[in-house]
């Protein structure tokens, strides 16, 4: 993943809708295909999400999340295969464990933990992708009303 890709993807708001920008780090095998299914099925969902596809959620470095916020994202979603379905056997378990530890660090850095969401979405769950994106977008919009600061500690 190139730094300029994340910078472009994380620009604060969507030009067309004015909605807060959300970055979704997704695995190539399940969630990306679930999002693709939603698109090819012409399901409607918020257009403020920028998807960054990686081979597996196990590949998602927690620092990617911090970088996304630093570059202007207002929310970050991490999503991959359901437990037991990872195409690399256990990448999603590693990811879940990494986040359990990393979550405390994010809080220590002052990140509002409501702005980070994890989910499991399979390739056949286009409906779930739509629901997760719409619910997360609504949540981020409600937070933006109170404060636009991601890093609450200065
Ligand atoms: S391949 Fe999807 S989470 Fe590992």
Image: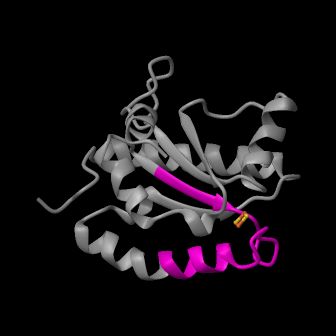
Left/right of residue 49 with respect to residue 43 in the rendered view: left
| Image spot of residue 137 (x, y percent) | 54, 43
Q: Is residue 87 magenta?
A: yes
Residue 108, horizontal then vertical, whole percent: 25, 74
Colour scheme employed for the rendering of this structure:
one colour
Which residue appears at 35% of the width and 79% of the height? 104
Give the extent of the magenta segment: 76-99
Q: Is residue 148 above or below residue 84?
A: above
Q: How many marks?
A: 0
Give the quadrant of residue 110: bottom left
Where in the figure is residue 107, as x and y percent of width and height? 31, 72
Image point (33%, 40%), residue name: 72
Q: Residue furthest top?
A: 16
Residue at image x 66%, y 57%? 55
Image quarter (top left, top right, bottom left or bottom right) of the C terminus: bottom left
Horizontally, is 34 left or right of 2 in the view? right
Give percent across and percent down for residue 44. 74, 30
Point 41% across, 75% down: residue: 103
**Residue 152 colored in magenta in the image:** no
Examine the image and state in which quarter residue 111 appears: bottom left
Q: Is residue 4 left or right of residue 97?
A: left
Q: Is residue 30 left or right of residue 109?
A: right
Which quadrant of the figure shows ligand 1? bottom right
Farthest front residue in view: 2
Above/below status of 67 relative to 96? above
């Amino acid at each position: 993943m190139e730094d300029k890709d994340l910078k472009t993807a994380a620009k604060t708001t969507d030009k067309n809708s004015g909605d807060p920008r959300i970055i979704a780090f997704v695995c190539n095998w399940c969630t990306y295909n679930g999002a693709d299914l939603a698109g090819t099925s012409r399901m409607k969902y918020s257009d403020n999400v920028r998807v960054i596809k990686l081979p597996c959620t196990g590949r998602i470095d927690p620092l990617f999340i911090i970088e996304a916020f630093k570059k202007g994202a207002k929310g970050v979603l991490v999503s991959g295969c359901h437990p037991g379905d990872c195409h690399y056997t256990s990448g999603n378990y590693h990811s879940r464990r990494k986040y359990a530890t990393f979550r405390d660090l994010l809080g220590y850095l002052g990140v509002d933990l409501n702005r980070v969401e994890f989910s499991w979405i399979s390739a056949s769950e286009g409906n779930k992708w739509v629901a997760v994106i719409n619910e997360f977008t609504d949540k981020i919009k409600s937070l933006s009303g109170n404060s636009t600061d991601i890093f609450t500690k200065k």
